[in-house]
Image (cartoon, helix red, strand yellow):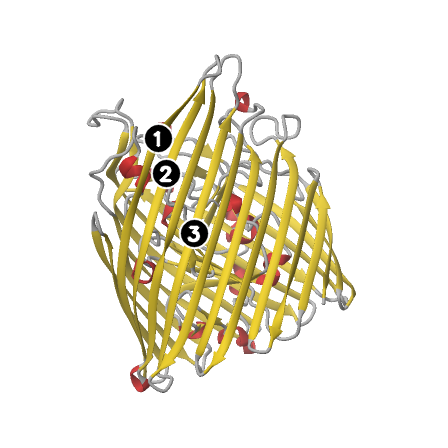
Amino acid sequence: MSFFERRRGRAALSLFATLPVLLAAHAARADDLEEIVVTAYRGPTDISKSGSAITVIPGDKINNASPGSLVDVLRQVPGLTVTQSGGPGGTTEVSIRGAEAGHTLVLVDGIRVNDPASARNSFDFAVFSPTDIERVEILRGPQSALYGSDAMGGVINIITKKRTGALSMTVGAEGGNYDTFAGNAAAGGSIGPASFSVSGTMFNTNGFSRVGDRDNGEPDGTKKLAGSARASFDAGDGKSLSFGVTAYHQESDVEKGSKPTDDLPGYERDRDVLTAFGRFEFEGFDGRVNNQFTVFGTQTTSRYTEPLTTTFRGRVGDSTGDDFGAEYQATIDMARYGSLIVGARAEQESGAQDTTTTSLGGVANTVDNFDNARTLLAVFAMQQFTLFDNLNLSLGGRYDEDVDGQGFLTGRATAAYLIDQTGTKLRGSFGNAAKRPTMFQLYDAQYGNPDLIDEQSYGGDVGIDQELFDGRVNFSLTGFYNNFTNLIEFQSKALPDYPKSSYYNIKSAETSGLELSADAILWPSVLKATGSYTYMRAINLDTDLPLSRRPQNSGSLTLTYTGIENFEFGATAIFVGDRFNNDAKTAAALVPLESYTKIDLSASYKLNPETTLYARLENLTNVEYQDAFGYNNAGRSAYVGLRWTH
């Protein structure tokens, strides 16, 4: 028995006790099976035909959650691990199936927003504020064959709303504990062949101390602004033009470190993300070929400030990451042979970091850490077809190349078999994935290593989606496995065999487990339940010790009551099991993080068809919990808001 297995927390038993409820639950009603997703196959696809494990979070669920982030909504998705360091505005990472946060590709309207200038080319969800979101699609498992580098764990695609038809508007505001205030507005509609959507949000909180004494220390506030705009024009004859812009801005007080003595004033982090796209679609060959040409760009800028004191030099770190390019994709209708997608992509990725220090005498000195760019090319293809009316298959591959560096070839296959008589879908997927070294890892003046090679992985899953009782009960169960090699890890020269403190391809890992999602109509029009559970074994193969911050057991359970007209009440319990804060060479060096269960309540009442009054009580039992060692999260807090729609 491995060390990891011996550390199973007793607290997980409380979640196992809910499994009978979850197994009697309904993951998707019958009409949900007709839902269309776009992330699983790079185009609109009936979710019932998807062999991949994919979760769709609808926009109304996001609108009813905290306006400051997606954190608590993402915690309820099976296979996802969320690490928030110190509440809203603190670094927030999301990993999928035990992969690293840098192995999660994040898209906004299909455009990647991972930061090319960051150490792991990851996306920090702290900067994200929900704007006018239509839905979020989460695709689990290796997806480099569809999306290239960074998609080793999976893909999160945030899709903003495209408002059509008559003009519609939404305005909302809320306030609550920690001097928190949030507001949002959205509008859009169609005028003839043209449609538009605009939205904006703001969020401000004085917060609490991120480290040390949460309630009596120096509070760390956060300010956020976000906006989005989309427009499209349908020219007829299969021709259309669309564009979109999304922007996020964040200003946060942070701490010097994770120790209680690091609760000091003057440490700040600002971050901006701007992404835009333009897309032209046109048909050919009597509508049998849909052509899509997209130009895109994303810029991420950040500034980290450390104050000048009587004993410490002031320091400002600036970072800029850019990614822009063009992509062509053709979807070919091959009649009884299914459909074929082919495409090509070219992009320029650049990153720069510099640090300015100010001496006690007031003299400033700026040092460039790195300033580099690279040209990336890719070609891809995927065939989808159906056999025997109910066996849906796909096979795809992609080649990615850094013009001045390495290249990698990836592939993916999926299958979904529908048994209509029993409401059963059997599915499976398998593929390999890769992640190229980041520009920071390659070129940083102090820690860079130009000899790094691509990280590699392979993995797959098998699952069943089962409908029962005419769609009132349904559940989804998935088993998965992933193997990672050539993983890049930072090592200090103080350790043997490392000539300098740098990054090296020295780590191998393995993750496996089970994912369960479910939801049930317990009492029609009165009470329903939804739940999720993940069992995950995530092991460093070089040490046979657990990977950091990956709980072996996690899950959620929600009860929603709608038995009173115009009134809705919900209670959600989120459970995260025992895990360790750090990777280590020996078991004795592991730092444990305790399991926790957080309970949130919500209620809403429609004052009239256009106006809704709502409230949330978060962390009902005031549990003290940490996603990262030393960093606090919010205590019991209440929020009240009003939403108007027309």
Asked where in the image residue 441 lies, by quadrant, the reply is top left
Q: Position of residue 218 (x, y in %)?
A: 63, 26
Q: Are marks 3 and 2 in contact (CB under 8 Å)?
A: no
Q: Estimate how packed mark 1 is, as few (under 14), some (14 to 19) or many (20 or more) residues with alpha carbons within 10 Å.
A: some
Residue furthest out toward the right: 607
In primary-sequence order, the first of circles 3 and 2 is 3
The image position of residue 380, as x and y in percent, is 27, 65
State the residue position of label 3: 298
**Going 59% across and 64% down the picture, which residue do you hit?**
197
Q: Distance between the residues labelled 3 and 1?
A: 22 Å
The mark nearer the N terminus, 1 or 2, is 2
Which amino acid, by three-letter code, is at mark 3? Thr
Any part of residue 319 in sight? yes
- In depth, the one of 629 and 532 nearer the eye is 629
Disc 2 marks which amino acid? Answer: Ala
Is residue 237 rendered to the left or right of residue 524? left
**Quadrant location, the N terminus:** top left
In the rendered image, which residue does mark 1 sit on?
368
Viewer-proximal residue, 593 or 488? 488
Is residue 609 toward the left or the right of residue 636 in the image?
right
Q: Which mark is residue 352?
A: 2
Dot 3: what SS? strand
Report how far apart the C-alphas of labels 3 and 2 lie in the structure. 14 Å
Quick check: 563 left or right of 371?
right
From the viewer's perspective, is residue 437 above or below residue 244? above
Badge number at residue 540: none
Write down the quadrant of residue 204 in the picture: top right
Residue 424, quarter of picture: bottom left
Lower position in the chain sequence, tag 3 or tag 1? 3
* Above or below 395: residue 618: above
Q: Could you give the CA–CA distance between mark 1 and mark 2, rounded to whole angstroms?
A: 8 Å
For badge 1, the amino acid type reads Asp
